[in-house]
């Protein structure tokens, strides 16, 4: 594969194996995951993998999106928890220094990873109950609509 060859060439001969369409297997094999915000963060959470989330958009898209969305987090685990469980780096904060520092801190902190696994399990259990209702509430909140009184 071209991607494997390019990675190997750029990493001073280190061997890479690209798993196309096998994200679950890759995440299960990983001690921690660096990924872009999106459904992959939900997958990593359900697999109980500690993660660092990064996301960079074009400057114009980011300017428009940041004005429209009024949520405190971008990753699904943080949105579902209602707090910052996993580190998020956006736009100009997506740097090698920031990402590597956070990944190193996470890999070295056994208690933090264990706490994340516990919280991920709790969230997983919560979303399995009445998932359709909870998804509808989350969509209404993200869209800025008031919740019906019987929620």
Image: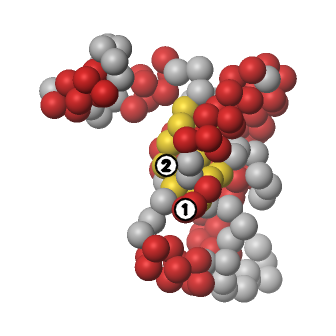
- Say what secondary structure mark 1 lies in: helix
Q: Which mark is residue 122?
A: none
Question: Residue 21 appears at what percent x and percent y?
Answer: 29, 34
The reply to whether dot 1 and dot 2 touch (C-beta < 8 Å) is no
Answer whether residue 131 is visible to the viewer in this image: no
In this view, the mark in front (1 or 2)? 1
Which residue is disc 1 drawn over? 91
Tell me the residue at 28%/21% (across/down).
8
Mark 2 surroundings within 10 Å by alpha-carbon count, few (fewer than 14), some (14 through 19), many (20 or more)? some
- Left or right, 26 with reference to 119: left
Determine which quarter of the picture holds residue 32: top right
Q: Quadrant of residue 131?
A: bottom right
Question: Which quadrant is home to the C terminus?
Answer: bottom right
Does the rendering let one see residue 55?
Answer: yes
User: In the figure, is residue 64 to the left or right of 93?
Assistant: left
Q: At which x and y percent is residue 43? A: 51, 39
Front residue of 129 and 71: 71
- The residue wearing badge 2 is 36
Residue located 51% across and 56% down the image:
55
Say which quadrant the N terminus sits in.
top left
Residue at the extreme left: 1
């Amino acid at each position: 594969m071209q991607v494997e060859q390019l990675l190997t060439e750029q990493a001073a001969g280190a061997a890479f194996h690209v798993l196309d369409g096998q994200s679950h297997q890759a995440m299960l094999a990983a001690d921690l995951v660096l990924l872009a915000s999106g459904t992959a963060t939900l997958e990593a959470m359900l697999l109980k993998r500690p993660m660092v989330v990064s996301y960079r958009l074009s400057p114009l898209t980011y300017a428009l999106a940041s004005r429209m969305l009024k949520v405190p987090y971008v990753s699904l685990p943080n949105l579902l928890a209602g707090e910052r469980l996993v580190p998020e780096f956006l736009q100009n904060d997506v740097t090698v220094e920031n990402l590597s520092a956070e990944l190193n801190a996470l890999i070295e902190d056994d208690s933090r990873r264990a706490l994340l696994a516990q919280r991920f399990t709790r969230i997983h259990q919560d979303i399995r109950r009445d998932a359709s209702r909870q998804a509808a509430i989350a969509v209404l909140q993200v869209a800025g609509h008031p919740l019906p009184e019987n929620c």
